[in-house]
Image (cartoon, grey):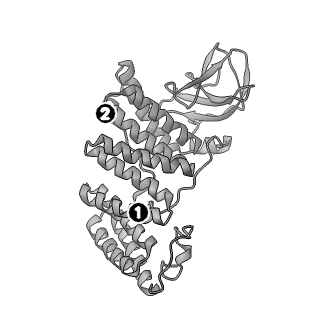
Amino acid sequence: MGWGMALFFSLFSFSACVTTPSRQSPEKLDNAQELHEEGKKLFQSGKPTEALDLLGRSLAICEEQGHKICIADNLNAMGLIYMAIHETEKALDALKRALPVNQEAKNWFAVAAILNSLGKIENDRGRDAEALRYFNQSLEVSLKLKYPVGLGTTFNNIGKIYYHRKDYAQALQYYNRALEFFVAGGDRERARVVMGNIQLTENHLSGEKSADPATQEKPPEEITAAPPMDLHKKEEPARPGTVGEEKARVLLGSGGKETPKEITIKKDRLNLYASPSTASTVKGKVLMGGAYPVLDRFQGAGPEEVFFKIQLNNGKIGWIYDPENNGNF
């Protein structure tokens, strides 16, 4: 199925407000899609210049035909390829052109990702104020969508701004918010990136140096909301706090350990954290002697960095830290 023969089955088909002009030619639009798909393959095979040529030809057909979705797809892809090859001005031009088209098409997932990309570009140029403006706009869209990946991505990238400003306490707040959303959405890979950023930031706050020299030199990592060639695809949002035990074991990883169904607290007054990080907000204290159901398990970067998500008798839910990686508190 192509853009021409299946207009309403495209990945943007939920955008009912986008009209289809009567002059559109299905054959030309199918040709545009073929060029677009071939362009993506060329980029993935390491040929960005050739990819951009085909995407540009596809874009020209889409503009001639007045097909908003087709235009948005090509501009999204071109902008992200220009970012990948560090042609900043061309990336900005393509993404800024893509933004209103996606807004008109009501493709809010792409809008959130584009705003985040624009923020990253401005941040890389040292324009923190502009970067924060884009990041905050991305947060606003992702909040309306209840979109954990978008929220976690942007909170992480804001944290990077404060990290480079050496405002480590503020950076840590944003990183921990990011971690909460990635854990809630069951996104193991992005959660691990944020855990690494949290560790770097905690090292600065404590004045400690990592035992691993490579870690000391490693800057905080940025996160993208979607793979470069999949920006036009909707990432399925997960409802916060709904990651089941089996899904948590698969997505978040258990380090080869079974997740216990219940934990008995053997140490007095453990902290109950908002997210699986000792730098996150402390929601309460857990007293010795209580036995609580385990909802999730999170294996951090180190073998001893294990957190368990529990529910207290009063209904409060949070994370406790098991430094010995054995569940014996």
Q: Could you tell me the amino acid type at mark 2?
A: His
Compared across the picture, whether 9 is left or right of 126 comes to: right
Q: Residues within 10 Å of mark 1 (few under 14, many from 20)?
A: few
Residue 60 lies in quadrant: bottom left
Q: Nearer the viewer, residue 251 or 168?
A: 168
Query: How far across and down, in percent of the image, does residue 13 sit?
Result: 55, 70
Label 2 crowding class (10 Å Cα cut-off): few <14, some 14-19, many 20+? few
Residue type marked 1 = Pro
As helix, strand or loop, the secondary structure at mark 1 comes to helix
* Residue 147 seen in the current view: no
Give how far apart the Cα atoms at labels 2 and 1 are.
Answer: 31 Å
Which residue is situated farthest in the top direction here? 268
What label does residue 164 carry, if any? 2
Residue drawn at (56%, 75%) of the image? 8
Residue 109: give x, y in percent of width and height.
50, 57
Single out the mark in the foreground, 2 or 1: 1
Identified at 31% across, 31% down, the residue is 165
Q: Quadrant of residue 194?
A: top left
On the question of residue 8 being in view, the answer is: yes
Q: Which of marks 1 and 2 precedes in the sequence?
A: 1
**Where 194 falls versus 203 (above or below)?**
below
Residue 206 % position (x, y): 39, 19
Q: Residue at x 30, y 68 (%)?
A: 52
Mark linked to residue 100: 1
Which numbered circle lies on residue 302? none
Q: Residue at x 42, y 66 (%)?
A: 101
